[in-house]
Image (cartoon, rainbow, N blue to C red):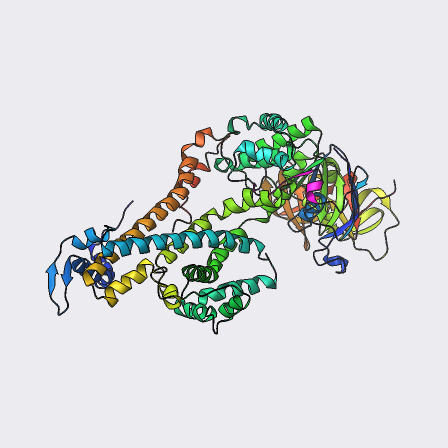
Amino acid sequence: MDKTINQKAWFLVLPVFLVVAFSAVLPLMTVVNYSMQDTFGNNQFFWNGVGWFKELLDPSTDLGGRFLASLGRNLFFSLVILAIEVPLGIVVALSMPREGWTVAACLIILALPLLIPWNVVGTIWQIFGRPDIGLLGYVLNAIGIDYNYVSNEVDAWVTVIVMDVWHWTSLVALLCYAGLKSIPDAYYQAAQIDGASRWAVFKAIQLPKMNRVLLIAVLLRFMDSFMIYTEPFVVTGGGPGNSTTFVSIELVKIALGQFDLGKAAALSLVYNLIILIVCWIFYTVMTNAGVERKVQAASEPAAEPKPSAALKPVTALKPKEGVA
Amino acid sequence: MARIDLVDLAHSYGGNDAPQESFALKPVTMTWRQGGAYALLGPSGCGKTTLLNVISGIITPSRGKILFDGKDITPLSTQKRNIAQVFQFPVIYDTMTVGQNLAFPLKNRGVPQADIDRRVAEIGRLLDLEPYLNRKATRLTADAKQKISLGRGLVRNDVAAVLFDEPLTVIDPELKWQLRSKLKALHRELDLTMIYVTHDQTEALTFADTVVVMHDGRVVQSGTPAELFDKPAHTFVGYFIGSPGMNILPAEVRGREALIDGHVIALNRSYDNLPAGAKIEIGVRPEFVEVVAPAPGLLTARIERIDDLGRIRFARTRLGDAKLAARAPAGFTSADGNAGLKFDPSHVHVYADSLLVEGAA
């Protein structure tokens, strides 16, 4: 391989390097700087070392207690919406038509919630759920269910979860639908001939063919719900009490409400770290799932029945699919 | 185990009211005998896959009936018909092992586990899949996957017929031959009706004892490979089977003579009652025309090139506007590019509107 070596090419990378440095690295370093200090305003800073971090991870302090509680609420929230949205998305995708004008109609209707800005979604549900003028709140109370998301924690949680399901199930459904569409008809025909029941078709064909898009859906939904801020903030403002205060809401309260820059900086760094780690785990799992198959296919050719010498290098060299 | 009868069967994707010319499968009545090895041969889009899917029940025909052993099964779903089908691209249940793949159709039908194990082992042995039964099916090569698809059909002991829809498309050339021989051997061993769809005449002629040629939604001829070669019932069959295909030349036919450009070509039989107004052509395979030195009384053609196929040489010639391929005997050369054509009268057929006319002796 004769590769032209041209050091001047680095100049082409320079603009990106500068943009990233000024937009990401430098601000991040500012945050790191804040996280090591305390301030009482007036631009006076005092060195605090890793004090904030210690406090953050210690549940007995005010900061640590608030952080860990909101983290727990956040994980619980993510878990609940994943447990609802993924199966629901699959069911929606399975019941969508496969051809005809109804496909377009379904796609448009499903895409609508995804197109609405977060704060508008929040406002819609905030009004929708109000017991005095909201359709949902009023009707529920009228039929004898005592519903008030402002004063009742369970009601607040239900509202926030239903809102997220309404907003984001479409995404899972659309991804699953794309996965389903890519299954050739022959699979269904073969399953018919094999006498497979609807459930067997789902288990043997549809679910395995969807697992890649499902992984992406779970990743996207987890990250989004873990970072959720606008919608619950608009609807409940984190209340009643602290019951729907998620990590990002807590962070904003500390940073902008109390103007505790040091604490907020430490919190946001840890928050960032958690997200990075989760991303890395997902990415590794997904990449490995793809690579594993290829490696095994390439390393076991001798064991395959009548392997074809002509085909082998092609399979081994095939670029990884769907890694990104 | 069954004889399959098609009675006035037709299918149109546009519904029964569409004009018949647009039917994907035009009305056909024919019988597939029990234990036969059939090839359904035709170019892409001729309706052969439609016919296959109608038999397996994936498509419900617009009209007509399908009988298995005389019993009308047209309204039955695919699951209820005793049909196995192998598709163009291997269909494998990814998450299952080879053994589980083979067991799948039996499991779905609620067969007891002991019977399943016995049948899977048996079919695994039959298809040389034994060493791979506990292995994930996704990692195997395309030909092994096709064998699994076939095995899923054979594993049921009630199967009446196995349908193949161009099953060797994705298989490497050298493995195609092996897999085809395997199919032949299985056919001899299992006494199953097999219907094999293909657009490759070599595949069709080597696999089948009866070849059914389809053209434009119609079954144009059904017969042994030798019959298709010697006596094509339709000019399309003559052209499609054989390489190069049959020469079709417009001619005037009177009694025992055909006239081309005023030259007389002798015929073996007498054709006195040809339909009036029909387009009359004669058809002769290149194997039965010989190029010789030009001589008076012989039709003269211009030689465009000579293809040397090793065991035989074919001269590609031009006769006015028509093209004609002919056998070039060893040592034949032409000084001025002209050659005389010598026809073998016993192999010259007469076609009226593309259909073979049987002459009188």
Position in image of residue A83 (x %, y %): 46, 51
On-image quarter of the N terminus of chain A: top left
Position in image of residue A236 (x %, y %): 38, 66
Image quadrant assignment for residue B155: top right
The number of numbered badges drawn on the structure is 0
Residue B330 seen by the camera: no
Q: Is residue A17 left or right of residue A133?
A: left
Query: Which of the two residues, A150 or A27, is positioned nearer the viewer here?
Result: A150
Give me the residue at 25% from left, 51% from top.
A59
Position in image of residue B245 (x %, y %): 67, 44
Give me the residue at 29% from left, 53% from top.
A68
Residue A296 lies, with reference to residue B351, above or below; the image says above
Position in image of residue A77 (x %, y %): 39, 55
Q: Is residue B234 left or right of residue B178?
A: right
User: Does residue A83 show up magenta in the picture?
Assistant: no
User: Does residue B84 show up magenta in the picture?
Assistant: yes
Give me the residue at 71% from left, 29% from top.
B191
Residue A235 seen by the camera: yes
Query: Which of the two residues, A132 or A180, is positioned nearer the viewer here?
Result: A132
Query: Which of the two residues, B246 or B32, is positioned nearer the viewer here?
Result: B32
Residue A115 lies, with reference to residue B149, above or below; the image says below
Image quadrant assignment for residue B181: top right
Residue at the farthest bottom position:
A133
Query: The magenta stretch spans which residues?
Result: B73-91
Give me the residue at 43% from left, 49% from top.
A215
Query: Which of the two residues, A257 or A305, is positioned nearer the viewer here?
Result: A257
Q: Is residue B297 left or right of residue A214?
A: right
The secondary structure that most of the magenta stretch takes on is: loop
